[in-house]
Amino acid sequence: MAEDVPQVTEDVPHMADDVAQMSEDAPQMTADIDATVAEDLGHDGAEGSHADEGFPGWPRDPSVLTSFAEHVAHAIWTGQERPELKLVSHGRKMALIGRPVPAIEGLVIATGLSPLIECSFVTGDPGLISAFVERWHKETSTFHLPVGELTITLNDVSSLLYLPINGAFHSFEALSMDEAVFLWMELLEVSGEEARAVTVRAHGAYVRLSWVRAIYEMRCQAQRWIVATRAYLLHLVGCTLFSNKSATNVHVVHLEAFCNLGQSGGYSWGAVALCVTDDAYEEKSPRASRWLTIKAHMKGFTGAPYRARCDALTVIDVCWLPYSDHRGVRGFELISSFQGQLRWGPTVVTVRPEKVLRQFGYIQSIPPPPISASLSYDDIDDRWMHFSNHVVAVVTFV
């Protein structure tokens, strides 16, 4: 809908040289994806398209998806099956620590991370997630579906989790064991001997979430509120944004983001996790709260039905503007249209909204070639802080 996204016109500054420009006759603003437009766009996934042409189900041009031969999708197309993903949820760990005590609640809210407390889920749907993992390609950072490419956008992050998408990127490097021990001593006020012992037990610069939880409780008892806040926040992001396959540990390096709590709220945080609709959801809550579920709901669900449903998708099956009734609570931010590279510490990802224009209410055109330029961290940060010069260029027609 027109009110859901800002109208970006020809006055938008040109993109950087390493990003190909959109042609002027490409995307057109649309009030909705109606039946006429859907019919035109639907040829990508409807009958009479690739299937009838004998398209084998994998890329004809190996220069685009360079890792396809090692991708799980290749195995599936050649008749091989694979077990579904094993999902690890930290929802119960969050339940053990609960909400922050009143003395630190304001400090937690100021970081912008408090919505994550409401979004912790106990059980995910492995079949659904497996079906989408099979369609995710790191070269394009998008899901490849019969209706075209889709991805998780900054707009999704803002609407689903209520996390701030504006702000600075956090700079950090990998920690040595001694540096990890120093962080524990400096920021959580534990002895060097204790810090070294728990870090060694975690096989590197990691620590068990249960130990972080214990530190939080002890610092609350001692009324060491700043330290207690750091411990709580480390536990929170360890259960959500930075959860890992260990299901028990969080990396010590993330504690650096809470060294100065006054600066923690200035970071651009982001992640998303969703599952099945929750009838108790209220529109004022983070959108992700609609998709909370319990283990009983997932019994007997496998990936095959989801895979078949994804394969059968047409344009009219997709809700392209899922937040239309939520805009009064969480508005669209222009930074969601940023095109370029994002980073958190040394991890760099590329966002390309010009490949998923329908998710912004525009008609999708042929996107430009992949971005190959590698930028320095300083350049990435500079472009992000001046994002209005690097939003996807869209021309509207009267």
Image (cartoon, rainbow, N blue to C red):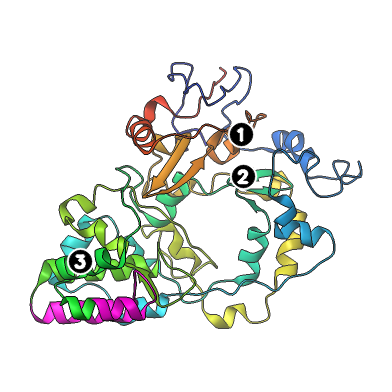
User: What is the three-letter code of the residue carrying label 2?
Assistant: Glu
Residue 130 place in picture, x, y as percent: 65, 65
Q: What residue type is labelled 1?
A: Pro
Label 1: which secondary element? loop
Q: Residue 370 carries which label?
A: 1
Say which of 234 and 330 sits in front: 234
> Is residue 93 covered in magenta?
no
Nearer the viewer's eye, disc 3 or disc 1?
A: 3
In what quadrant of the picture does the C terminus appear? top right
User: How far from the left and from the top, in percent, is residue 248?
Assistant: 41, 78
CA distance separating discs 2 and 3: 38 Å
Q: Quick check: 307 above or below 126? A: above
Residue positioned 16% across, 70% down in the render: 185
Verify CB contact (< 8 Å) between mark 3 and mark 1. Answer: no
Image quadrant where residue 91 sits: bottom left
Disc 3 on helix, strand or loop? helix
**Residue drawn at (58%, 35%) of the image:** 357
What mark, if any, has residue 139 been given in the picture?
2
Question: Which span of residues is magenta-colored?
Answer: 196-222
Residue 346, position as x, y percentages in the image: 40, 49
Q: Quadrant of residue 179?
A: bottom left
Which comes sooner in the sequence, label 1 or label 2? 2
Instruction: Please tell me which of labels 2 and 3 falls first in the chain.
Output: 2
Q: Which residue is drawn at 38% across and 70% down?
A: 239
Task: Decide if residue 320 is in sight here.
Answer: yes
State the residue position of label 3: 182
Q: Distance between the residues labelled 1 and 2?
A: 8 Å
Count neighbours of disc 3 (C-alpha within 10 A) and say few if under 14, some if 14 to 19, many if 20 or more.
some
Task: Name the foreground residue: 202 vs 131.
Answer: 202
Mark 1 vs 2: CB contact within 8 A: yes
Please say whether residue 104 is visible from this viewpoint: no
